[in-house]
Image: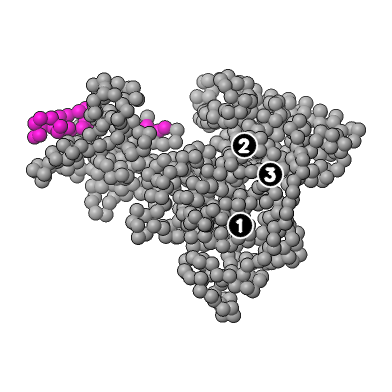
């Protein structure tokens, strides 16, 4: 509870005598919950049973519906004095009503408690109206985003200023230009909350929630896509169904600093010189590496004889499950590839001692000490919460008091001691879970996880440098692969590929089945056939869905919903074949742009320079400058595209209308 005030009254005029208000005393609270802040008012005589709270909202999961009955509409005070505040009168025309499936009276609780209790999330708040100073005791009215006004709250003890100050810590409030008494909740560029309820909330939840913690959001309610998102990012005016590109660029730049989007719109023409990558070759995969193949490639002291050969086998077919416990330690870098069996045993002994020393550090912290260590408390709280919902359908983690859950918890807590600056960020439990499942050993799982986190560290850093870079790189690759598809995505405000955020953050962990993710990860860990192969996996998935997205003219909402619903439906072997074919296409290209060559780590003496962009990779524009494709002179026209960098070519090349 971050704010609490007694003596906050509702002046109800629902009684028989319309000229006299009935005063209902209550307590007003602002409560910080896990991923939201709520405002809660209830009468003093109401019990603390939260099942009795009536929530104003249209969502089907609400406890009640906010209704206006025909009888109440008729009693609206048309004959009331004009000086009477409309908000005071509103309580006579709006009442809370239980949902049909509830028992009890339509306008009161079944147990006779007050019908006036309400609770709402700040993400649903549209505006606050206050009375003028010097006009009696202070009061204010909350208006929600569906234009429903809550009963006026009157502050008989003190005033409403402390409440406003408290709310301003969580939402941006600006005075209305039309009425100085009204404070409007600023939505555009006010990306101050996370992306988690983005699919539940009727208005702007998508953008408001990402900046605070995109990790929580992406891990959270990604599955709850509804049509609300249309209203979230598009104007309600049918004549303006697309937000200005500059505005879309602004909110994304606010969300991920340094992620620049080229949105200089000049409809009709775009000169792009497309590079012909040729036809994608046919690619096949082999059976998983067997224990016999693995053993044959070791000498008498247990050293791997041909590291490159064994990596190629793993890339083409993965590993049989019995090999994973040993082979993953090499793939993740816990065991050196050139180490002998004896050297590995000595390494494990040293690492075991080191692990338990770090584990003892947090285990030995007393409750009194932890009370004075907020960071450790926060890490522990978040870890306990995440562990209880990580892969609980897997037999290794299902049930109560599961030893797998205890190990998951202890390893993550110990990692906080290993890297206290990073600590724990939501999503890391997803990366550890398969590793622990394969290792079946606390110490080995920890050090393999440490090695994996060395690769993934930038994904979880506060500045999101890793995520920013990968989104930019993915856009370069996808535009080279299919510029027409990129242009279509941009026309639907989806060119910045935000829907790939979760794929990249936790390496497809939530997109494939548990067994498929074991196969996918071990293939990626070979670092073959090029750098950033995971970005080509993204390209392969998107290219596979391109036809449906474009043929059915999917818009912003439909693209997001469609990509989200691919989870657990993607064929891992097909996508691996397709991504490998794409890599072969690009490596065989004689005119490969330099930017793409650098992303994939391909040494190619025939790469096309793209110095005209004026920016390096870290500041590259997401919609890839057209100069990237100017090595071939055939002009290609893309609808709704840009002419950035193309005007100088217009003098020597003919422009064809889109």
Examine the residues drawn in magenta and state their main secondary structure: strand
- Residue 346 point in image, percent of width and height: 81, 28
Tag 3's secondary structure?
Answer: helix
Marks 3 and 1 sit apart, C-alpha to C-alpha, by 21 Å
Q: For this rendering, which residue is in front, 306 or 450?
A: 306
What residue would you read off at disc 2?
Answer: 513
Judge left or right: residue 278 versus residue 242. right
Q: For this rendering, which residue is in front, 414 or 227?
A: 227
Q: Which residues are magenta?
A: 4-33
For label 1, count other residues whose C-alpha is less than 10 Å away and answer few (under 14), some (14-19) or many (20+): many
What residue would you read off at disc 3?
Answer: 573
* Quadrant of residue 77 within the rendered picture: top left
On residue 478, the disc is 1
- Residue 384 point in image, percent of width and height: 54, 27
Judge left or right: residue 404 versus residue 372. right
Marks 1 and 2 sit apart, C-alpha to C-alpha, by 25 Å
């Amino acid at each position: 509870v971050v704010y609490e005030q007694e003596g906050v009254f509702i002046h109800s005029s629902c009684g028989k005598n319309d000229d006299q208000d009935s005063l209902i005393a209550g307590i007003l609270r602002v409560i910080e919950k896990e991923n939201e802040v709520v405002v809660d008012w209830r009468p003093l005589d109401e019990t603390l049973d939260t099942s009795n709270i009536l929530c104003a909202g249209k969502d089907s999961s609400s406890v009640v519906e906010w209704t206006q009955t025909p009888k109440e509409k008729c009693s609206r005070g048309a004959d009331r004095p004009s000086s009477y505040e409309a908000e005071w009168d509103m309580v006579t025309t709006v009442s809370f009503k239980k949902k049909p499936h509830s028992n009890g009276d339509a306008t009161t609780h079944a147990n006779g408690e007050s019908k006036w209790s309400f609770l709402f999330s700040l993400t649903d708040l549209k505006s606050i109206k206050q009375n003028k100073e010097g006009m009696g005791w202070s009061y204010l009215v909350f208006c929600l985003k569906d234009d429903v006004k809550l009963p006026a709250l009157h502050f008989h003890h003190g005033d409403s200023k402390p409440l406003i100050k408290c709310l301003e810590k969580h939402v941006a409030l600006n005075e209305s230009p039309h009425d100085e008494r009204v404070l409007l909740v600023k939505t555009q560029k006010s990306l101050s909350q996370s992306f988690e309820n983005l699919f539940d909330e009727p208005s702007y939840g998508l953008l408001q929630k990402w900046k605070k913690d995109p990790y929580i959001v992406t891990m959270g309610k990604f599955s709850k896509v509804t049509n609300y998102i249309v209203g979230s990012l598009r104007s309600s005016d049918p004549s303006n169904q697309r937000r200005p590109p500059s505005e879309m660029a602004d909110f994304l730049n606010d969300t991920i600093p340094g992620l620049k989007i080229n949105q200089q719109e000049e409809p009709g023409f775009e000169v792009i010189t497309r590079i012909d990558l040729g036809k994608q070759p046919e690619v096949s995969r082999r059976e998983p590496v067997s224990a016999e193949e693995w053993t044959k490639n070791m000498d008498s002291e247990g050293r791997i004889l041909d590291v490159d050969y064994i990596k190629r086998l793993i890339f083409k077919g993965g590993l049989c499950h019995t090999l994973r416990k040993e082979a993953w330690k090499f793939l993740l870098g816990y065991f050196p590839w050139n180490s002998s069996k004896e050297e590995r045993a000595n390494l494990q002994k040293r690492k075991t001692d080191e692990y338990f020393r770090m584990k003892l550090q947090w285990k030995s912290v007393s409750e009194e000490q932890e009370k004075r260590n907020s960071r450790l408390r926060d890490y522990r709280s978040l870890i306990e919460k995440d562990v209880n919902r990580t892969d609980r359908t897997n037999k290794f983690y299902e049930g109560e008091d599961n030893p797998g859950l205890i190990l998951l918890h202890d390893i993550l807590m110990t990692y906080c001691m290993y890297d206290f600056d990073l600590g724990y960020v939501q999503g890391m439990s997803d990366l550890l879970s398969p590793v622990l499942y394969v290792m079946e050993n606390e110490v080995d799982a920890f050090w393999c996880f440490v090695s994996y986190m060395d690769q993934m560290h930038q994904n979880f850093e506060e500045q999101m440098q890793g995520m920013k870079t990968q989104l930019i790189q993915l856009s370069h690759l996808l535009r080279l692969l299919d510029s027409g598809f990129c242009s279509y995505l941009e026309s639907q405000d989806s060119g910045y590929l935000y829907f790939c955020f979760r794929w990249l953050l936790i390496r497809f962990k939530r997109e494939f089945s548990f067994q498929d993710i074991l196969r996918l990860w071990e293939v990626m860990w070979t670092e073959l056939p090029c750098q950033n192969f995971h970005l080509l996996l993204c390209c392969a998935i998107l290219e596979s869905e391109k036809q449906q997205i474009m043929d059915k003219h999917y818009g912003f909402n439909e693209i997001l919903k469609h990509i989200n619903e691919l989870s657990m439906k993607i064929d891992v072997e097909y996508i691996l074949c397709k991504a490998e074919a794409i890599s072969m296409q690009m490596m065989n290209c004689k005119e490969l742009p330099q930017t793409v060559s650098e992303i994939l780590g391909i040494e190619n003496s025939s790469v096309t320079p793209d110095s005209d962009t004026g920016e390096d990779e870290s500041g590259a524009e997401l919609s890839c400058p057209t100069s990237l494709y100017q090595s071939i002179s055939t002009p290609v026209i893309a609808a709704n595209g840009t002419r950035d960098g193309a005007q100088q070519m217009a003098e020597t090349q003919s422009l064809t209308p889109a």
